[in-house]
Image (spheres, grey):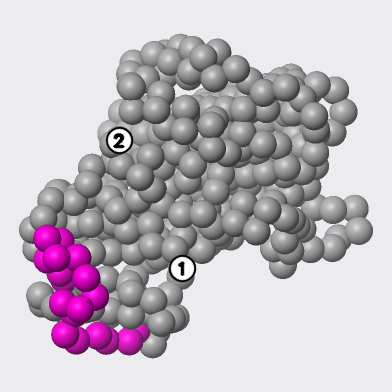
């Protein structure tokens, strides 16, 4: 059986995070949505229905019988059971939208669906970027159980201080945690394979530190935070999701934020997550090309892939940064910074495409990951169309 992830109507709603990936490749909790569903359904063969310019990098479906799935939600046990039991021609519907279906991709059409079942349970559904940090605690809990059930954690070194129940702490093989404090009374803490918590860190769950990532010396990490693989984080962080391969290695605060891949926040970069008048925060909406009310009192920074901030950068509450932007000028940059901004201020010139690709290639090579022609084509499309 082939598992086919569909962006459905959500791709534009998750910009700028989905400029460079399908929705299934976003991270929340410990895993990406794709990784989570592969484990839940025990299906390794996956494909994507996404934007045309992304399709070359992300495998198109084979024309075979497939499990079609909108991936950006956490299933209940009952819904997961219904998905597993779908027979050819059967589908599940949630809030009047197709959620999952067992269909033949050769004749991809709703006409082949003979039976639709409405899901009446309320699901944890992710529909916009801020949902990734708002629902991150639930995602961490979900993934913690999925990844650790029936397994034994490494022992926590006696050099550390610990509060809570040890069953809420899991340390994977190769991880190092020394001379720090970990508080699981407020939520679970997951430390991934070969990750490191350096001396003097304070962790207050729920937290996920993924494979080969680090909390630098003296970091203060508040709950509902995920740091994806191969990332470095220091300073003060509260309710942040970092997809992976990104660094915030120095002092400075970010909260209630989502950071894509291959980003770097310079030393003492700060992001406000609360307005002085305590009113709801507005975020830039790419679909409607305007700022829209999130209904959230706490909302910080949403940053697309390959973007970077210089030392001492100060982001306003509710700032959206596009792909491959370089923010380095003095003063508060605007709340919306377009793709390929060079400087970050309104009216600045664009970051030259060839230079942006050179930087991306250089940064990825440091992690021994190739910047492919598909990657170059994606950035070229974003540069020309957005």
In the picture as drawn, the residue positioned furthest to the front comes out as 384
Local secondary structure at mark 1: strand
Question: Relative to the observer, which residue lies in front, 195 or 59?
Answer: 59
Residue 100: percent from the left, percent from the top?
Answer: 27, 71
For label 2, the residue is 57
Q: Which quadrant holds residue 112?
A: bottom left
Q: Is residue 266 visible?
A: yes
Name of the residue lying farthest toward the right = 277
- Tell me the residue at 87%/28% (across/down): 331
- Give how far across and how far down residue 225 sits, in percent: 55, 47
**Magenta stretch encompasses residue 227:** no
Q: Which of marks 2 and 1 precedes in the sequence?
A: 2
Label 2 residue SS: loop
Quadrant in the picture for the N terminus:
bottom left
Which portion, as a residue range, is magenta? 102-119
Foreground pick, 105 / 165: 105
Image position of 342 with respect to 30: above or below: above
Q: Which mark is residue 229?
A: none
Q: Residue 125 got which mark?
A: 1
Question: Image point 20% across, 78% down: which residue?
Answer: 111
Q: Label 2 neighbourhood size at 10 Å, few (<14), some (14-19), many (20+)?
A: some
Image quarter for residue 155? top left
Location of the C terminus (image quadrant) = top right
Q: Position of residue 190 (x, y in %)?
A: 41, 46
Query: Does the magenta run of residues contain 106?
Result: yes
Res 36 seen here? no
> On screen, 268 above or below 6?
above
């Amino acid at each position: 059986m082939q598992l086919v992830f569909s962006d459905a109507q959500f791709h534009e709603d998750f910009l700028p995070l989905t400029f460079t990936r399908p929705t299934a490749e976003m991270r929340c909790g410990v895993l990406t949505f794709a990784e989570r569903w592969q484990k839940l359904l025990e299906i390794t063969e996956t494909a994507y229905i996404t934007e045309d310019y992304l399709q070359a990098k992300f495998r198109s479906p084979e024309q075979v019988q497939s499990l079609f799935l909108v991936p950006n939600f956490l299933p209940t046990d009952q819904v997961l059971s219904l998905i597993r039991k779908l027979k050819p021609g059967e589908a599940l519907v949630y809030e009047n939208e197709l959620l999952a279906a067992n269909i033949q991709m050769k004749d991809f059409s709703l006409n082949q669906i003979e039976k639709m079942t409405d899901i009446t349970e309320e699901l944890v559904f992710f529909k916009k970027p801020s949902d990734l940090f708002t629902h991150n605690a639930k995602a961490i809990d979900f993934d913690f159980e999925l990844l650790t059930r029936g397994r034994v954690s490494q022992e926590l070194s006696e050099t550390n201080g610990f509060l809570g129940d040890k069953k809420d702490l899991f340390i994977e093989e190769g991880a190092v945690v020394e001379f720090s404090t970990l508080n699981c009374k407020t939520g679970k803490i997951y430390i991934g394979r070969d990750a490191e918590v350096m001396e003097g860190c304070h962790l207050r769950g729920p937290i996920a530190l993924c494979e080969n990532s680090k909390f630098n010396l003296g970091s203060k990490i508040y709950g509902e935070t995920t740091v994806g693989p191969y990332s470095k984080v220091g300073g003060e962080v509260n309710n942040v999701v970092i997809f992976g391969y990104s660094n915030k290695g120095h002092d400075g605060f970010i909260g209630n934020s989502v950071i894509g891949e291959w980003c770097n926040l310079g030393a003492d970069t700060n992001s406000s997550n609360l307005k002085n008048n305590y009113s709801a925060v507005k975020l830039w909406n790419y679909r409607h090309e305007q700022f829209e009310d999130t209904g959230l009192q706490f909302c910080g920074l949403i940053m697309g892939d390959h973007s970077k901030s210089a030392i001492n950068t100060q982001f306003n509450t509710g700032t959206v940064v596009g792909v491959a932007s370089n923010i380095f000028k003095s003063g508060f940059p605007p709340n919306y910074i377009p793709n390929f901004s060079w400087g970050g201020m309104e009216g600045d010139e664009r970051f030259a495409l060839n230079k942006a690709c050179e930087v991306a290639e250089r940064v990825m090579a440091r992690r021994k990951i190739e910047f492919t022609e598909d990657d170059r084509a994606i950035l070229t499309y974003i540069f020309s169309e957005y």
